Amino acid sequence: STQEQTPQICVVGSGPAGFYTAQHLLKHHSRARVDIYEKQLVPFGLVRFGVAPDHPEVKNVINTFTQTARSDRCAFHGNVVVGRDVTVPELQEAYHAVVLSYGAEDHRALEIPGEELPGVFSARAFVGWYNGLPENQELAPDLSCDTAVILGQGNVALDVARILLTPPEHLEKTDITEAALGALRQSRVKTVWIVGRRGPLQVAFTIKVLGPEGEGPGARADGPAPALGRCGRAELPGVEEGEPGRAPGGVGEATRAVPTGDVEDLPCGLVLSSIGYKSRPIDPSVPFDLKLGVIPNTEGRVVDMPGLYCSGWVKRGPTGVITTTMTDSFLTGQMLLQDLKAGLLPSGPRPGYAAIKALLSSRGLGSL
Ligand code: FAD
């Protein structure tokens, strides 16, 4: 059939998940065409707007993605917000298969009093600010205080702490934004507290994040569910740690934090909450598990939606490094190609981008 000759495949999102899925499809099917739709003007998702500017070696994957984008069977269409400018059913009409790889655009809220106060930001917004994410350029964090508190103890918390404490002259050679560099040059922040629910043995960051010499801010165990008092105070209930050394697995990951009722005040001028990213549903026609924050799927096949697939953070939840995302995206690509081979995708030719382009222009919109 024509479908076997030219499968038209659409990928939504141009982060690692989108690009690695596209790479797998193009490599393992000699005629497949892949269109990548992206809401930003520019590609690469969190590799551009998340990964810290002082870790340029991580950003080298951009070279591989650029190779994929250069294929004459691959096209990038930026400035298209799927779910708003074009719906998923419209994409499904135009393509033989659609892969949702749109990542995790929200942050998890602490849901504690004081979260909305000035001087309290999500680490996600702060990261977007120093990396040039358009929607966060107005953030203007006040760095005139000497103490900042980061709530959360994952890799992102460590990135943020490191950026706050790195001498600006070390950041000059990176692609950090001029505005962020200017603000960090004026910064008076000297102390960064990383406040986590669990102890130093259970922190979720990898040593590499601390910096090449293992330097960087230390972690300190403190209590769960802090309340943010009047701007500038983080009140932290104390915590009784379990016995990390004896927990199953030997590294204490199963240890639970238990509130002790002790409360400690940490005067500070900046609070960054860093307890995780969160995916959101983008189209009512696509099933979404609000509790887990993922599209329900079996190995990347969206449940009960033939021809619809997912990969990356929206498939697994917002954890894991780029190589984890690569592995799961290759798997999704493999499932899609299996279904194609088994004749489970719609037969007959599909118009692909030509139809979407016409739809967008009928709405007064255009892609890049
Ligand atoms: P994303 O990279 O978020 O890509 C999703 C893309 O979809 C984005 O481009 C987004 O704009 C687009 N999109 C969203 N909604 C729509 C829509 N409606 N329509 C069209 N497009 C849409 N990993 C490492 O290996 N090393 C690191 O040093 C590292 N540092 C990190 C630092 C931070 C702050 C964060 C948050 C993560 C870091 N990671 C790091 C993890 C890594 O970034 C992720 O594993 C990876 O980016 C997940 O890929 P993804 O494609 O699922 O999501």
Image: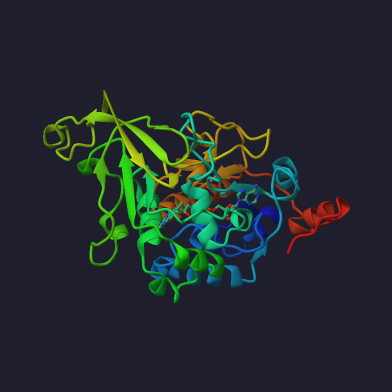
- Image position of 47 with respect to 337: above or below: below
Q: Which is nearer the eye, 135 or 325?
A: 135
Nearer the observer, 216 or 277: 216
Q: Quadrant of the C terminus?
A: bottom right
Q: Position of residue 327 (x, y in %)?
A: 41, 53
Tell me what residue is drawn at x 40 percent, y 67 percent.
54
Q: Quadrant of residue 38?
A: bottom right
**Residue drawn 37% across the image and 32% down it:** 226
Residue 328 in sight here: yes
Position of residue 299 in the picture relative to residue 140 (left or right) = left
Percent position (x, y) of residue 49?
53, 59
Rendered location of residue 76, percent (x, y): 65, 63
Where 277 sits versus 240, above or below? below
Q: Is residue 298 left or right of residue 305?
A: left
Question: Which residue extends farthest top?
Answer: 261
Left or right: 265 as drawn, with respect to 11: left
The number of callouts visible is 0
Q: Nearer the viewer, residue 44 or 115?
A: 115
On the picture, is 38 further left or further right than 298?
right
Q: How is the image coloured?
A: rainbow
The image quarter in which residue 61 lies: bottom left
Query: What percent of the width, then of the height, locates residue 195?
Result: 32, 41
* Residue found 47% across the figure and 32% down from its top: 292
